[in-house]
Amino acid sequence: MRAATTTTPMPRAMRAGVDKPRAVRASAVRARATRGGAVRARAAAQGIEQEVKIDAAPTTLLREGSGEEGDATQMRARFEKMIRAAQNEICDAITALDGKPFHEDAWTRPGGGGGISRVLQDGNVFEKAGVNVSVVYGQMPPEAYRAATGEEGASKEMIPFFAAGISSVMHPHNPMAPTVHFNYRYFETDAPKGSAGAPRAWWFGGGTDLTPSYIFDEDVTHFHQTLKDICDKHDGEFYPKFKQWADDYFMIKHRGERRGVGGVFFDDMNDRSKDELLAFATDMAGGVVPAYVPLVAKHKDDEFTPEQRAWQQMRRGRYVEFNLVYDRGTTFGLKTGGRIESILMSLPRYCEWQYDHAPEAGSREADALDAFKNPRTWCA
């Protein structure tokens, strides 16, 4: 709990550096206004309107009067319904485990869209856990499109887009309990200006991956097997393909190691019907609780040493490196002027970097690092 603060009047002589002349104060106000205007101008230039905080989450974040909201035939409405339900289910499970409720922030944008961020910070089990949903309408700069898709190109046209998704990262206190990340999203682009009649592009993406500080083989196997069972229900080729994609995607290239033990990852999927891909994304989001929560429940009260805590903090430093340098979602949010607190929700409360650190040969830390450098087969 944050300590209460009180303010007492300062003697005039002590306020010499505080009680500035009126002209100076007015100048400071103008400077703040200029900075605020710059933030709004930057958001506009980057293609997304400035968000407006609201007291409670609305029934839908879809654009009013667009015909999308409440229309069960519209993929935009169906996907929003799915991610809102997943957010509720996952937050309820985490609250039941931790004993502390999530704090919720909701916002909208004048032209449509908005988001709901739920964050549990300094809980009994979790150092920080966040589950965000967002619906975004905007004009995408070409570099943001390339960040979102991984495609190359030299186009300079702004691209109208719609994006909806759920994204989450959970960092437990105990070094023996793993971190998890997942996100599932649906994306559409409209034709650029001057390209009337060009087809609208759409795709689904997402994944769930595990980042332990210490390897418990049976835990990682449980996690992967849960994801594989869901994949196999939809396509027998999904799990091996998407596991490899996760192993490749979550590589911290400048370190030559992955941030964790992977899971599944897929992107730009539009090779089958929207209905099929929505069903797959729905089942994958529904698999987060059974794949992950039992692992934290198992290890949340394990004993650990200060040295093991330090190793956890170093691994979280690697997590930060990946998210800020390579993660597509983070890059896309920053390039389109998204809500910063929600974009950076994934970062841990605490992390550290030690100069030229190498774990002792034969140690559990060395085993973990080997798993991060050399992906293992966790289930057949």
Image (cartoon, rainbow, N blue to C red):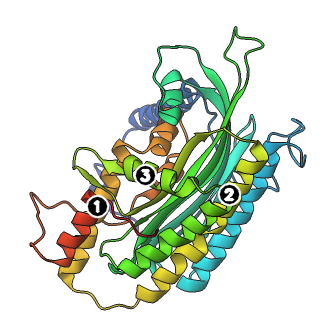
- The residue singled out by tag 2 in the image is 234
The residue at the point 64 percent across, 50 percent down is: 165
Residue 364 vs 254, above or below: the answer is below
Examine the image and state in which quarter residue 66 appears.
top right
SS at circle 3: helix
Q: In the shown orientation, is residue 88 left or right of residue 180?
A: right
Q: CA distance from mark 2 to mark 3?
A: 17 Å
- The residue singled out by tag 1 in the image is 372
Q: CA distance from mark 3 to mark 1?
A: 13 Å
Assess disc 1: are there few (<14), some (14-19) or many (≥20) residues with their C-alpha within 10 Å of its C-alpha.
Answer: many
Select label 3 or label 1 by which is in front.
3
The answer to whether mark 3 and mark 1 are in CB contact below 8 A is no
Q: In the shown orientation, is residue 143 left or right of residue 88?
A: left
Kind of residue sitting beneath label 2: His
SS at circle 2: helix
The residue at the point 33 percent across, 49 percent down is: 251
Residue 345 is at least partly visible in this image: no
- The residue singled out by tag 3 in the image is 244
The answer to whether mark 2 and mark 1 are in CB contact below 8 A is no
Q: In the shown orientation, is residue 370 left or right of residue 57?
A: left
